[in-house]
Amino acid sequence: MKVSDKAPDYLQRILGARVYDVAIESPLDFAPNLSARLKNRVLIKREDLQPVFSFKLRGAYNKMVRLPKAARDRGVIAASAGNHAQGVALAAQTLRCKATIVMPVTTPQIKIDAVRARGARVVLHGDSYDAAYAYAKILALKQKLTFVHPYDDPDVIAGQGTIGMEILRQHAEPIHAIFVPVGGGGLIAGIAAYVKRLRPEIKIIGVEPDDADAMAQSLKAGRRVKLDQVGLFADGVAVKHVGAETFRLCRALVDDVIRVNTDAMCAAIKDVFTDTRVILEPAGALAIAGAKAYVQKGSEKSGARGQTLVAVASGANMNFDRLRFVAEEAELGEHREAILAVTIPEKPGSFKTFCELLGPRNVTEFNYRYDDPAAAQVFVGVQVKNRDETARLTRALRRAGLKTHDLSNNDLAKLHVRHTVGGHAPLVKDEILYRFEFPERPGALIRFLTSMSHGWNISLFHYRNHGADYGRVLVGMQVPPRDKQKFQAFLGKVGYPYCDETRNPAYRLFLG
C-alpha cells in the first residue's frame, strides 16, 4: 500500500515533529486481565496520561510551533468541544500566544473551565461542533487568526503520528495489529503513515461508534461521505465528515475499520479500569472495544490468538456524572446481563414456576404490572456469564411454554422501557414512538414543543440524565396518518437526532 509520491513525506515530518515540549512519551502498558480473557497479549498506549489527558496536544503543538512568528503574534483559533480545545490552549500557553476556542453552547462547564484555566478565550456558539467550526472559520477571517484544524492538517497529522513512532520503539517484537479510535481521522492517519513505512506487516485497524462511522462509510464508498447525524456518547469522535487528507491516507494505509456500540465502549471502560484503575472517556476506550470485537468475531478470520495487540487509549476526560450510565451499560456490553420480556399466565403458581426456571441466577431487575386477566408481561434482568448463557435461558423459558423476547441488545428497552414498565394505554389512538437526543441546554425542550403541531398530543414522555452533553428522551405522540408529511417536516425543523421506535417489540409488549 503506497501513498502518492506528490504527498507530504510523513516519515520525515513525524521524525522531525516538535511535540515533546508539551507531551510525554506515554507508556505502553501490558493489560494482564484483558490479555488473559482475550488469549492475546494486549498492550495499551496510555495517551490518557498526557498533561491534558488526551493525545490532542501533540498535533496542536506541532502545528502551532511551526507557525511564523507574525502569525503566532496575531493568535490562533480552533473549534472544539473538549480535547482539541485543551491541546490548543496548552500549546498557546507554552508558546505565549493568544488562543480563541469556539465551543458549542452544550459543552459541559468542566471542559470550558479547563480551557479557560490555560488562558484561552472561550466563545460559545451553536449546538454542535459543526456550528462552532463554521463560526470559528468566520472569526478567523475577520480577526486574521490562524485556524488550527483538529485533524485535517499535515502538521497535526504528523504530531499525532509520533504515537506510532513511540509504539514501534517501545515494542520491537512482532505486533499483529494496532487499534486506533477514529473521529476525523488525524490520529489513525498519522500512526498508519509511520507504521506502514517501517513495519507494513502490522495491521492498522480503526474503531468507530456504530452511530458515528463516517470513516467506515467513506472507505466503503470510495469517497468522503457526510453523515446527517452522529451519536454523541463518544463525543470525542462525533464527526460527521472526515478530513480530505486523512481520508486519502486512510484509504491507502488502513486495513479495516470496526464499528462498536455504546455497550461495548462501556464494557471497555470497565476493562481498562480493572487493569489500570483509570477511567477512560468513551472515545478513549474505543480502541480497546475494537480489539475485543476483532478477537471475538472468530479466530479463523482474524487469526488473533497468542498475538500482540496494541490499543491506543486516546483520552480520559470523562464527566463524573456519566459513570452511573457507564456502570449500567458495561454489564450489557460484556453480555453479563440478560434483559428479557416474558409472558407468563396470570394464574396462581405461575410466578413461582417462572422463578424456578431462572434458577440460581441473580435477578438484577424485575418489573411487572397487572394488565390482562389471562397473561402478564414481565420485564426481567438476569446476571449471566455470557451471551451463550442468555441463549440457553431463552430456550429453556420457551420450552416451558413461556413466550420470551431477548431484549439485551434493544436500546429502547435498556434506556427507557425498563424505567417505564406498566404504561399500557389502550385508549390512546394514532400513537407513534420516537427516541430523541436533546442537547443538555436551557430551552431544548421548549424548542421541541414549539416546533410541534398544536394538533398533536404528547401521550408518553420519558427522560433520563446520563451525565452526558445530551439527554436521551422517549416521546410518544398522537399523530393522525394524514399528518405524516407534516411530521417529517417537524423532524427536520427540530434538528435533534432521532429514531423511530413505533414497531419496537419492547414498546408493543409494555407500553403500546
Image (cartoon, helix red, strand yellow):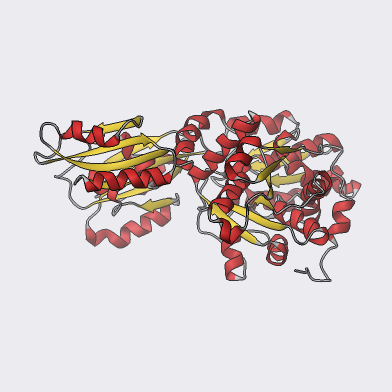
Residue at (90% x, 51% y) in the render? 16
Q: Is residue 20 left or right of residue 143?
A: right
102 and 296: which is toward the camera: 296
Position of residue 91 measured from the top left corner of the image (x, y, whole percent) = 80, 39
Q: Position of residue 358 (x, y in %)?
A: 29, 35
Picture quadrant where residue 216 is located: bottom right
- Residue at x 70% of width, y 31% of height: 116
Q: Residue 474: x and y, percent?
A: 35, 43
Image check: 241 left or right of 404?
Answer: right
**Does residue 151 appear left or right of residue 433 in this picture?**
right
- What residue appears at the point 57 percent right and 60 percent down from the top-left corner? 300
Q: Quadrant of residue 223?
A: bottom right
Camera-side residue: 509 or 466? 509
Residue 337 found in image quarter: top left
Q: Quadrant of the N terminus?
A: bottom right
Along the line of sight, which residue is nearer the eye, 76 or 115? 115
Q: From the viewer's perspective, is residue 152 above or below residue 64?
A: below
Residue 42 pos. (x, y %): 67, 43
Query: In the image, is residue 423 above or below residue 504?
Result: above
The residue sitting at 27% across, 41% down in the picture is 460
Asked if residue 458 can be seen in this view, the reply is no
